[in-house]
Image (cartoon, rainbow, N blue to C red):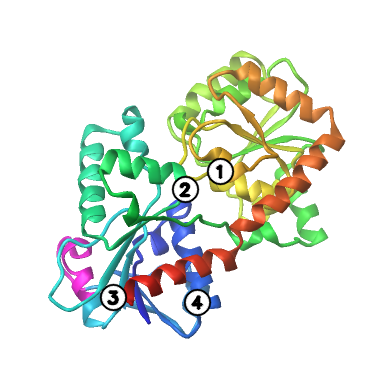
Amino acid sequence: MKIAFDAKRFFHNTSGLGNYSRDLVRILSKYYPENQYLLLNKNKSERGSDILENANVTFVETSKGTMSRQFKMGKDAQKQNADIFHGLSGELPLKWNKKSIKKIVTIHDLIFVRYPQYYSFFDRKIHLWKFKKAANSADKIIAISEQTKRDIIQFLKVPESKIDVIYQGCHKAFKEQQSIELIQDTKQKFNIPERFVLNVGTIEERKNLLNVVKAIKDTEIPLVIVGKKTKYFQKISNFIVKNKMEKQVHFLERVSMDELAVIYKLADIFVYPSFFEGFGIPVIEALFSKTVTVTSNTSCLPEAGGPDSVYIDPENYLDIQSKIKFLWDNKSERKRRADKGFEFVQKFNDEPIANQLMNLYKKIVQ
């Protein structure tokens, strides 16, 4: 089979959609080397260059022109005689020729419908139009969680039979054992406390970091935060300064993937009280790192966290505080839940996900 991908996010996104795209192509090329995988985009970048070294993965430069992703990329895939075109981020090209090609689109979330306040009016309208178009023209839709599947049925009015849930995994660094040298270097480089609670994710309102900071106020518990700052950061910074918490809260920047994997493993507790997620990759990164997780009892997060993570009401910082304190003071309970979480998270390993994807590809080209 020859499978073409919209590789814009593969080459140009550093986090969520980019990681999903790179991991998907990486695991397919590893477990199903007999197929050809085409990465279509206007240009390449250094991201994913290791995956492009595989003999069965090829970069294809799309035709020049305005809006070439929308109007040329689909036809470019057909010129390459691709059997399947897979849009990896909720979109499919708008123009095709008469040559046969099957179309799949992955939809990660419909947060812009559920939480319109986080998006501009223009972005909401464009996203909804693109997603509806893609859902209608696709032969199959991949939802990355049961929560997203329910949202696609509700908001895009798609029949359930058209949707398959295939979870996503996470970067291999979180499943590896980093060297003692790297662990020591990371501790020193970032001046990491001996014990700490960890939060990872873009520092934006939906991720609800302010309630974590409120939860550790009036405790001695250090908080380490890794994530890109948005204007919401100022609200958190103001609270920290007002409550003299500067020595208690540590913001880390320019953290590599291997360093991040070390930091997850060093943490006593991972806390992720997001109001809503399409999936919640940081949760499975923590579980693969054998770090007990406190996360929200909303959206798909119980799907990612499994039965042995600790669940909180994200609106209630006192609930977050009591759960963190309970785990902080109870080493055996942290270990028990971390071990159980590690057993649970194996379902998000590369091989089962690759098998599910390939079964879907084979089914639609029959």
Question: How far is the residue under mark 4 from the one under mark 3?
Answer: 20 Å
Three-letter code, disc 1: Glu
The structure residue drawn at horizontal position 29% and vertical position 79%, both measured from the top left corner, is: 82
What residue do we see at 33% from left, 77% from top?
366
Q: Nearer the viewer, residue 296 or 70?
A: 296
Asked if disc 3 and disc 2 are in contact, CB closer than 8 Å, the reply is no
Image position of 85 (left or right of 191):
left
Q: Position of residue 15 (x, y in %)?
A: 48, 52
Q: Which numbered disc, 4 or 3, marks the residue closer to the eye?
A: 4
* Residue 114, position as x, y percentages in the image: 35, 32
Q: Secondary structure at mark 4?
A: helix
Q: Real-space Cα distance between discs 3 and 1?
A: 38 Å
* Mark 3 vs mark 1: in front: 1
Residue mark closest to the camera, 3 vs 2: 2
Vertical placement of residue 268 versus 345, above or below: above
Q: Nearer the viewer, mark 1 or mark 4?
A: 1
Q: Is residue 184 above or below residue 322?
A: below
Residue at numbered disc 2: 145
Horizontal relation, residue 255 to residue 279: left or right:
right
| Amino acid, disc 4 | Ser
Q: Earlier in the sequence, mark 3 or mark 2?
A: 3
Give the distance between the C-alpha atoms of the residues marked 2 and 1, in whole angstroms. 8 Å
Q: Residues within 10 Å of mark 4 (few under 14, many from 20)?
A: many
What are the residue bounds of the magenta stretch?
63-76
Q: Which numbered tag is attached to residue 61? A: 3
